[in-house]
Image (cartoon, rainbow, N blue to C red):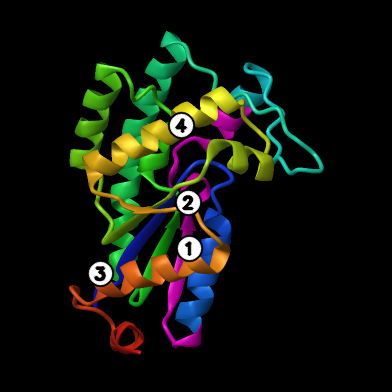
Amino acid sequence: MKPLIVSFSGIDGAGKSTQIQKLREYLAAHGVAVKELTFWDNVVMFPRMRAGFSRRVLQSDGSIGSPEKPADRRDKNTQNAPLLLGRSVLHFFDVANLRRIVRKAKAENSGVVIFDRYIYDQLAALPMQTWWARAFARVLLRVAPKPDLSYVLDADPEVARARKPEYPLEFMRKYRSSYLELRKMANLQLIQPGEVDEVHQAIVDRFRDCALQKELDPAVQSTVAA
């Protein structure tokens, strides 16, 4: 049986990690096998080179921000013509590898494969208010494998930054706008902000709707029927 491919995207601090964990627990409780892949660790090409460039050239501290210890990240929020050109080239490599990873996941897994971030998150860091970024995104979206279900967790930029203070608020607002643009371009499932359990229920409801339309592992079918 083919696995159900699910992706989670959204601005930093939107609650992706929390909701991925809750969905994993929900599926595990129903006996569904789940494999999780992290886009940065399992998909992107040349991750060490890219991380090293951010630290040494862009002077990013590279840490994960928290309310107790804010971070000063300078990576995707640092944008100029040479950087955007370089990232755009790297995104083609990322999509090529993503195609390989998805093929392998479909061949080796049943149940559910969850991607923590996807190519949508790479594209959202581009200035999607410009025509060339939208045109470039359309090209990559045609080539990239489309998950069976792609969530975008929406969040108020100020609230998200308070949870995970890493990037300037102005960038966070543009970042959110890019996700909303991509949502229309790629037909992503927008999950409105709310309490943790409310968001989880919305995710489960969309999951059931999607799974009912697919030829799935019997365990997943029983989860949908539950």
Q: Residue 75 is drawn in which quadrant?
A: top right
Q: CA distance from mark 4 to mark 2?
A: 23 Å
Evaluate if marks 1 and 4 touch, with contact meaning CB atoms under 8 Å apart: no
User: Does the magenta segment cover residue 41?
Assistant: yes
Tell us which disc is closer to us: 1 or 4.
Answer: 1
Q: Is residue 13 above or below residue 79?
A: below
Tell us which disc is closer to us: 4 or 2.
Answer: 4
Tell us which disc is closer to us: 1 or 2.
Answer: 1
Res. 141 in view: yes
Secondary structure under tag 3 reads helix
Specify start and end residues of the magenta stretch as a single range.
29-52
Q: Residue at x 52, y 41 (%)?
A: 156
Q: Amino acid at mark 2?
A: Asn
Res. 76 in view: no
Q: CA distance from mark 3 to mark 4?
A: 27 Å
**Which residue is the site of mark 1?**
199
**Which residue is the site of mark 4?**
175
Q: CA distance from mark 1 to mark 2?
A: 26 Å
Tell us which disc is closer to us: 2 or 3.
Answer: 3
Q: CA distance from mark 3 to mark 1?
A: 17 Å
Evaluate if marks 4 and 2 touch, with contact meaning CB atoms under 8 Å apart: no
